[in-house]
Image (cartoon, rainbow, N blue to C red):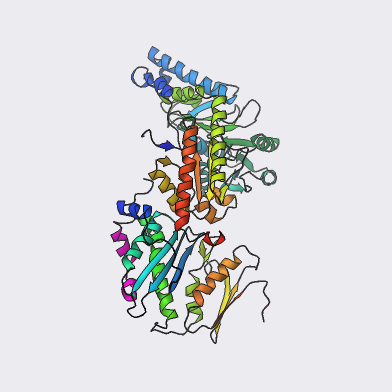
Amino acid sequence: MQNEIIYMDNAATTRVDPAVVEAMLPFFTEKYAVASSQFSHSPGIEVREALDAARVTIAQALGAAKPEEVIFTSGETESNNWALKGMARAFRGKKNHLIISKIESRSVLDTAQALEKEGVRVTYLDVDGEGFVDLDQLRESITDDTFLVSIQHANEEVGTIQDIDAIAAIVKERGVAFHTDASHTFTKVPLNLAETPADLVTITAHLIHGPKGIGALYVREGTPIAKWMHGGFMEFNMRGGVENVPGAVGFAKAVEMTSATQVEYISSLRDRLIDGLLARIPKTELNGPRYRRLPGNVNVSFHYAEGESTLLHLDMMGIAVVTGSACFSRSLEPSYVLMAMGKTHELAHGSIRYSLSRYNTVEEVDRVIEATAEVIETLRRISPLGKDEK
Amino acid sequence: MPIPYSEKVIEHFKNPRNVGRLEDYDAKATEGSPACGDMVTLYLKVDEETKTIKDIKFESYGCASNIATGSIITELAKGKTLDEARKISWKAAAEELGGLPAVKVHCSVLAVDTLRAAIRNYEEKHGLVEDREPTTVEVVEKRLRHVMNPLTGLDIVKTHVVKKTDVNNGVITVWVDLSRDHQFANNIEQEIRERLEPLWDVAEVRVIFNDDEEE
């Protein structure tokens, strides 16, 4: 990627930290033995130790009681698939009801829909105008037949951070298992599993400047989830297959490279961007909450300017963002997250998401505010809408 | 590039021709709506003698293919007679633009539809419509299918916002399943009127909302 590109799509994926690449490299060309070969030769033992160390680092970051509660997977999609399908399978013939929210990631929503076709009953919880799950509806929805509640820690599109402790308390009070997709909050928003009683937690490396293709599912000891991948005793007999050691090492290194200072820095960039866009561009609305919002998430709707056109202009100016406009999606459907929040189609069509990382700068934020103002002005000039109100 | 547009599409998207409004227009048409994500308004100035398009302007709320098609179609139509302009097809516009992605067809067809609607609007106003069919409930409903429900982006007939229509002695009555204070009530009423009032044998259009008292 060219240096002059201003990359603000960090909720899609992030640039890998060079320190992460460096930590991974020996595991391709030198320490390449299979970790589960620890019983056969010393190269295997060395690799095993690296995998164990990576697991400890990640377990500590989660506040897990034991490293064995962290099972490496290929990432968010796999962890979410396993959490839902693994629990459905474990409870088959006993319990048949799953609860999720309407704004879960695609990997939770699609998996829930696939389970529905297999006969599982699924409740989709509503969210309010800022994307917060309806806790009363959650309370009322749990029955004796419920085997799992899965609610994301935060939403990647509009940034809403759920009150995960309140949700976990409601679910655990009824003795039901609780899964949360924390892919977008891991190392950014506090989640301490010594205190929050979640049973299953999805995390992934590539959103925190780690490599793609590695993530984990935290499985609290005693959670009756079914084995996921058959074909060996790897990962505590839960997920067969040769371990992705370079990935796990890179994931752990990425975790080590994070800090509270960075989160503060990213949050300050986010606030500068939100304030700047709202002040500089009239008829602009913030989507999602102003507070309790992901550190790097900015999502705004510009009236009278369609999102794909806005995105295309910004792209030509070297700024990478995404839109919730139907015109940008393959399905030609507007963002289901904004729709669930009760936004109009028009606002969804005009929505733009900027997602920041520690590699973004104040100068970039200021340039993006100016560039966006220029683009919106251009599009509004040619738009048939909004002129009569001026 | 997020969507694989041709260079010419991008060029017209960046510098659209004939953008704006005509204050003393002879005909005007709007297709689409903000809710469906694309909307085009087009203005025509027509030479009464020769029936050629002297000036044409458009405004677009929409994606790049919508803007680019509006731009190219106004270029193609300028100086042409109404009959010639009516024959400009979406295919011709797309070819002129060096092709459009298949997924973008619906956004770009809108500009072509708008041009045809504006020509029709001119002809109706000037008594040039030869095939003067009497207006029936079918004709009314066909026209109302172009009015979008801003909440869903779908037309008001399909979404049953229109409860019933009636044509009687040049008076069209449309019953709308919304209350007067609905946020889009005025918007929808205005669009209904714009569609139906130009019909040659229509003297009056009545739009009745749920809470309106009927005479």
Please check the rendered image and state whether residue B98 is part of the magenta-colored stretch, yes or no: yes
Q: Main secondary structure of the magenta part?
A: helix
The residue lying at 32 percent from left, 63 percent from top is: B93
Which percent across, then down, holds residue A388? Answer: 54, 62
Q: Quadrant of residue A201?
A: top right
Q: Quadrant of residue A291?
A: top right
Q: Write the start and end of the magenta stretch as one range.
A: B82-99
Which percent across, then down, holds residue B98? Answer: 29, 56
Against A68, is A388 above or below? below
The residue lying at 58 percent from left, 50 percent from top is: A340
Position of the N terminus of chain A, as image quadrant, is top left
Position of the C terminus of chain A, as image quadrant, is bottom right
Image position of A276 (left or right of B75): right
The residue lying at 45 percent from left, 17 percent from top is: A50
The residue lying at 64 percent from left, 35 percent from top is: A164
For this rendering, which residue is in front, A282 or A344? A282
Image position of B214 (left or right of B108): right
Q: Residue furthest top?
A: A42
Against A69, is A376 above or below? below
Total tally of numbered discs in the picture: 0
Image position of A232 (left or right of A278): left
